[in-house]
Image: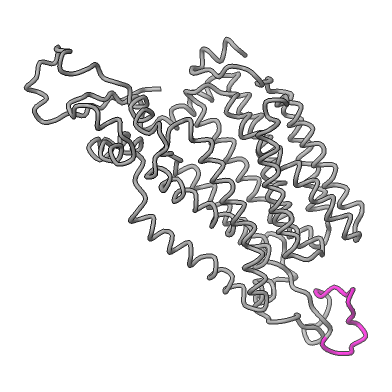
Amino acid sequence: MANSTHHISQSNLDEQDPTSTDQFPPPAPLNEIIERSLGAFRPAQFIQAILISLPLLFDGQQTFISVYTDAEPTWHCSTNNSTCNSSSNVCKLSKTVWAWDGHVDKTIISEWGLECESSIITGLPASSYFMGCLIGGFVLATLEMVGKQWRGRVGIGGFFCFTLGLLSLPIIAYVNRDSSWRTLYLWTSIPAILYCIIVYFFVIESPRWLFMQGRDVEAVAVLKRLGTLVNEFNSNVLFKQDTSKVGLYSSMKTLFKSRWAFRRVLAGMALGFGIGLVYFGMLLGVGNLGYNIYLSVAFNGFLDIPSYFLTFYLIERWNRKTSMLVFSIVSGLCSMLVVVVDRRKGVEIGLELASLFNVCMAFNVILIYTTELFPTSVRSSATSIVRQTIVFGAALSPLLISAGRKHKFLSYGVFGLVIMCSGFFVVFLPETRGVTLSDTMDEQRVQR
């Protein structure tokens, strides 16, 4: 991967002797300077960490809002017509003999008369959201503004914000249960818009991104604001930039050129696709079980919290390959059993929760496992690709959920088959528990 080099200096730098080391120390790598500047977690970084974690709260709401806005409401017979009863197929009934319970504009299904449309049409709104996430993931990158030793904790904070957003959604939906689906979007979108305004004025740009764009003076100003180390240096100090503007895409090419790395990427993509399809499918499809839609989303959301703690507690004690395989198989079996025990609501929701918990654990493990499979030079690209396949799986899940409203196997049965099949791809990956992380492709090649 090609590296570019920037230098930061005062205008009178050219007047100094470039060979002298008395006044100026040798250039320091950019990443080293940034890490030393941001190493201590100060109040300014804490505020920034909160502000950049909050979007995941709104993300958690928007990701699963279709559970309520795209649901098929209950209906009743509006006449005493003998052809109409509670078990009738509304698609075979005349519009004059039945009516929706509550307001017609409660969901998009009832307002736009989509109850008899194909699963592609009814699942399109939720799928479109995930496709937008997929495109955004290719275009945008995540840059953190804290030191390495704090990134894990800040990342956990982001996960909890996502869970908090998911848990707040059924509360907002229940309060607005008699309102139009548009009202629910307003209650979740207006705070997000206000947040965007706050971000514009208070969130500081990533110093690493500023350096990559050649905006060195602004980058140093940000480091001075967030940290303290830069202030200790004479402003004439040279900083050598070792981060390329196109590092993400260059390292992708490196991944695809190496046979062993490409094989790992493909196996990780297969795992990610199955996990994404089932994780998001389980959460989005709770309405198909006929259970209380507000309580079921809350129960599902709460499962995320113990899965985080259990993963971080046991990750050093578990083999990655074995745990991924076990979680995938158990999740798949529980999902398929949901189809077998059809109409036993208590058992169904129990099996659905068991399936979701196992796929939550698999989700957490694969995020850790992927970072251990690849060296530092290509790690960001490899994890980005796997995350994108997770989102791609999520984009297909609403289509299966819509199809599963009439035939449950097309949702929970397919979920079970996919997660079990994808789990077996772990046999093509090496075990990484306790293995020292490599920095370069050559080092990783020797270890594999």
**Name of the residue lying farthest toward the bottom:** 80
Instruction: Give percent across and percent down for residue 252.
Output: 49, 29
Q: Is residue 115 toward the left or the right of residue 220 in the image?
A: right
Q: Is residue 273 toward the left or the right of residue 337 in the image?
A: left
Instruction: Give percent across and percent down for residue 414.
Output: 79, 47
Is 101 located above or below residue 314 in the figure? below
- Quarter holding residue 427: top right
The quadrant of the image that shows the C terminus is: top right
Residue 44 in magenta stretch: no
Instruction: Give percent across and percent down for residue 73.
Output: 74, 73
For image coordinates 48% across by 64% down, the residue present is 191
Q: Which contiguous range is marked in magenta? A: 78-91
The quadrant of the image that shows the N terminus is: top left
**Name of the residue lying farthest toward the top:** 446
For image coordinates 39% across by 40% down, the residue present is 42
- Quarter holding residue 15: top left
- Residue 176 or residue 373, whichever sits in front: 176
**Name of the residue lying farthest toward the left:** 15
- Residue 381 or residue 40, whichever sits in front: 40
Prevailing SS of the magenta stretch = loop
Is 230 located above or below residue 171 in the figure? above
Q: Is residue 428 toward the left or the right of residue 12 in the image?
A: right
Is 167 located above or below residue 431 in the figure? below
Residue 86 in magenta stretch: yes
For image coordinates 43% across by 39% down, the residue present is 144
For image coordinates 30% across by 37% down, the residue present is 223
Tell how many labels.
0
- Residue 17 or residue 273, whichever sits in front: 17
